[in-house]
Amino acid sequence: MSFDPDSLAAAVARSGAAVRVVVAAVEGSAPREPGAAMILTPHGAEGTIGGGALEWQAAARARALLAEARPWAREEMRLPLGPALGQCCGGAVRLVLERFGPAEIDAIAALRARGAAIFARPLAPGLPPADPGHDGPRIPLGARALARAARQGTAQDAPRLAGGWIAEAWARPARRLFLYGAGHVGRAVVRVLEGLDWQVVWVDDAPERFPPTIPPHAERLVAANPADAVALGGPDAAHLVMTYSHALDLEICHRILARPFRWAGLIGSDSKAARFRSRLRALGHGEAAIARLVCPIGDKALGKAPAAIAIGVAAQLLALGAGDAGQGAETGGADAGGADAGGAA
C-alpha cells in the first residue's frame, strides 16, 4: 500500500481526527509487508497491520495519540514478534503512528495541489511535511530518490526511511474492472473483490438483475447494449465477460480485442473457448489478440460454485498487480451454465 490521502481525509471528516499506523519496515518474518496501514478514529478502525497482539498494542498506542491535540503528532514503535507478543513470526516490525486533524489534511491537500510527488515528513513529532520540489536540500537523498521514481511512475508501495524521515508515494487510483453480467458468478466476483485494489464497473442490460445494494467498490451501469461499455475502458482496464447470452458475450469480446486493454476473461468451458476463438478469427482478429482472451477463467481445481470461480478470478486479477498477465495455460474455470443464473454455456 502507499499513502492514501483521500481515505484519510474521509476518516477525519467523519470523526474529527484519525491516527494512521503504517508498517514502515520489517526485519525477518512479519505478518504484513512494509506499507500495510490501518486508520483508527474514535469510532473504529479501517485496515490491518497483521492482527493479533501486534495490532492490539499499536491500536492502544494510537488511541492515546488520538487524544492529543498537538500538530503533526507522531511517534515510532519497534515491536519484536516473539513470545512476549504471543506471536511466532520471529522478526520485528517498525511502526510509524501519526495523528491527523483538519489542519494536517489541509496541509496535505496543499502539497498535492503544488504537485508534490510524494508525502515526505520528518519522523520527529511536531514538524510538517516537505515538498521535494521546493524543499529538496532539507530532504534526505533516499526520500528524493523516491520522489524521482514517483514522477517516473516506478515508485514502490513500501515507505522509504532515510535520515530521520519517512517518505511514501501517493496511492494510485484503484484499477478498473469492467464486469459484464449480474448473475450469480458476477455477484460472487464483486463480493470477493471487496477490500482489494479494484473498482468494478458492473454492466448489465436489466436493472432487476443487480442486487438491491451495490457495495462502495462497485458502480452499477445499466446499458441497453452492454457491449457499448467497452469503449469506457482505457488501456489499463480489465474486462470480465459473463452475460446471459453467447451472442452478447461474443460482441463484447469482439469490441474488447479491437482496442488496447490490460486483461480480458470470458466465462466458459474449453468447448466454448474453442468456438469463440474460431468466431473471433472470422471477425478478423489475429492470433496474438485472441490468445490474450482468458477462457476458461479461474482455477478449475477449486470447483464450479460461483464463489469458487470468483476466488480463482480474484487470484488472476491480483496477479496483474504483480506484473503477471494471468494468461497461463494452467488456468481453467467453469462455464456459466448451471453456475450462474445470468450466464450461458
Image (cartoon, grey):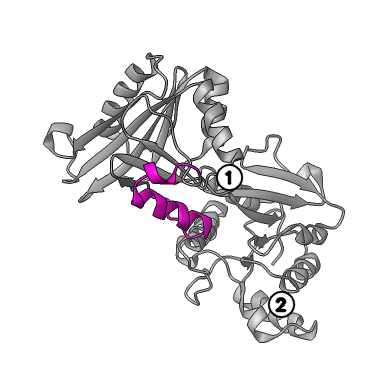
The local secondary structure at tag 2 comes to: helix
Disc marking residue 276? 2
Indicate left or right for 10 with 90 as reference.
right
Residue type at the position of mark 2: Phe
Quadrant of the snapshot with the C terminus: bottom right
Disc marking residue 51? none
Most distant residue in the front direction:
137
Q: Which residues, given as a range, are shown in magenta?
A: 134-158
Front of the two marks 2 and 1:
1
Contact, CB < 8 Å: mark 2 with mark 1? Answer: no
Picture coordinates of residue 310 (x, y %)? 55, 55
> In the figure, 190 relative to 45: above or below?
below
> In the figure, 52 relative to 222: above or below?
above
Residue underneath mark 1: 115
Callout 1: few (<14), some (14-19), or many (20+) C-alpha neighbours within 10 Å?
few
Residue 30 visible (yes or no): no
Residue 83 falls within the magenta-colored stretch: no
Disc with the residue nearer the chain's start (2 vs 1): 1
Indicate left or right for 274 with 8 as reference.
right
Picture coordinates of residue 167 (x, y %)? 40, 44
Residue at left 63%, top 38%? 215
Q: Quadrant of residue 275?
A: bottom right
- Numbered-mark total: 2
Observer-nearest residue: 204 or 198? 198
Observer-nearest residue: 246 or 159? 159
Residue at left 53%, top 49%? 197
